[in-house]
Amino acid sequence: MKHPLSAPPLLDIIQSATEPIITIDERQRIVMFNPAAERVFLCGADQAIGASLDILIPARFRAAHARHVSRFKDTGMSDRQMGLGGPLWGLRSNGEEFPMEASISQTRSEAGVFLSVFLRDITERQRVDQALRASRDELTRLSNALLHVREQEKKHIARELHDDLGQTLTALTMELSQLEAGCPPGDAEARARVRAMRRLIKKTFASLRRIASDLRPVMLDDLGLAAAGEWLVADFVSRYGIDTEAEISIGNAEPSKPVATTLFRIVQEALTNIAKHAQASKVSLRLHCTESQCELTVQDNGVGAAPESLAKKLPLSLGLQGIRERVRLLNGEVTIHTRKKGGFRLQVRMPAQPPESPWGAP
């Protein structure tokens, strides 16, 4: 039978193609089998031509494939397109199965309807994809472990500062009281120095509480996310004097420890970025948690940034990358809206109780 695509230039192109090209007739018999198909299927053209297309398909897929080819012959419509959908499976002559992509075209001639199938062996690509997925999984596990360790270290350092240094400062205060009581009534200079030292200890106490709270506020563990969020906002306003409207609503069930910690860190990072970069005069914060989902929005009226230039702002972009990674690990999503001189809005949605905790409760 003369092949419908047997014009010399076209036939030369098909025969020299680096990807397999197979043509079948209306009975799904192979009528053309190019050299690339011979190499991929480990089958010579003299063996393939005249045989059923089934010899190239694993038995469990043959019925479905035959229906698909028949539908395409009748309608000209195919749900198979190179690079789209899941892979097909081919069968080499040695019995080995392999994944492939395929697209199909139809040619009508006086000799009948012929279907040409263009194939691509994606065995190597799948191997690379699997290696990349394994690498991403490994990186995710490493990121989980690092987050857990970092939170544990922050918690430990915060408690050490609060307990050890706090006790030391308390002891110094008591010693100063005794020293002041022993000062001669007329020694104004000594009493003034004691009062100055007392003020210095008081200032050190305040710095200690601020540093410990920045590391890991005790109220997040003891009083929950709402109290910790309100403390963050109050501390932000007292430090920077920026008008901030906050609405924090936590349902009857407190979010899981990883979710609460992540939301706390996101609010902390967002407010820090606003203070350093936004030049804002007003901030709005909304945190709402139900039993199933948490939603957070932080918005300012600052200078904003063009979306394409956001990545160039290195400290800010690294902070946003950290937020995205934390949220991704908890099956959540982050949306950022910004434009130059148009403010900045950060939105976060995540499940309140993820199916699996990616890092232990800190």
Image (cartoon, rainbow, N blue to C red):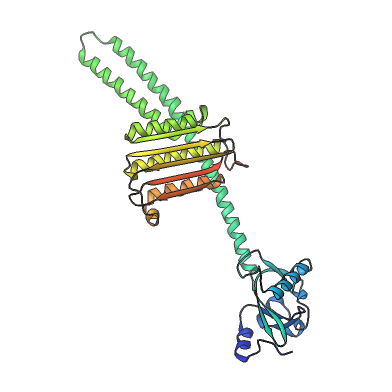
* Image coords of residue 73 (percent x, y): 71, 76
Q: Nearer the viewer, residue 56 or 39?
A: 56
The relative height of residue 357 versus residue 128 in the rendered view (above or below) is above
Q: Nearer the viewer, residue 130 or 190?
A: 130
* Image coords of residue 45 (percent x, y): 73, 84
* Residue at the far front in the pictured view: 75
Horizontal side, residue 205 vs residue 294: left or right = left
* Residue at figure coordinates x 48%, y 37% from the top left: 287
* Image coords of residue 125 (percent x, y): 61, 66
Number of marks in picture: 0
Classify the position of the N terminus by image quarter: bottom right
* Image coords of residue 46 (percent x, y): 75, 85
* Residue at figure coordinates x 47%, y 49% from the top left: 335
- Quadrant in the rendering for residue 202: top left
Q: Is residue 138 visible?
A: yes
Q: Which of 194 and 68 is in front in this view?
A: 68
* Residue at the far top in the pictured view: 185
- Quadrant in the rendering for residue 270: top left
Q: Is residue 91 visible?
A: no
Q: Nearer the viewer, residue 289 or 270?
A: 289
The relative height of residue 46 versus residue 99 in the rendered view (above or below) is below
Horizontal side, residue 66 vs residue 175: left or right = right
Classify the position of the C terminus by image quarter: top right
* Residue at figure coordinates x 35%, y 18% from the top left: 173
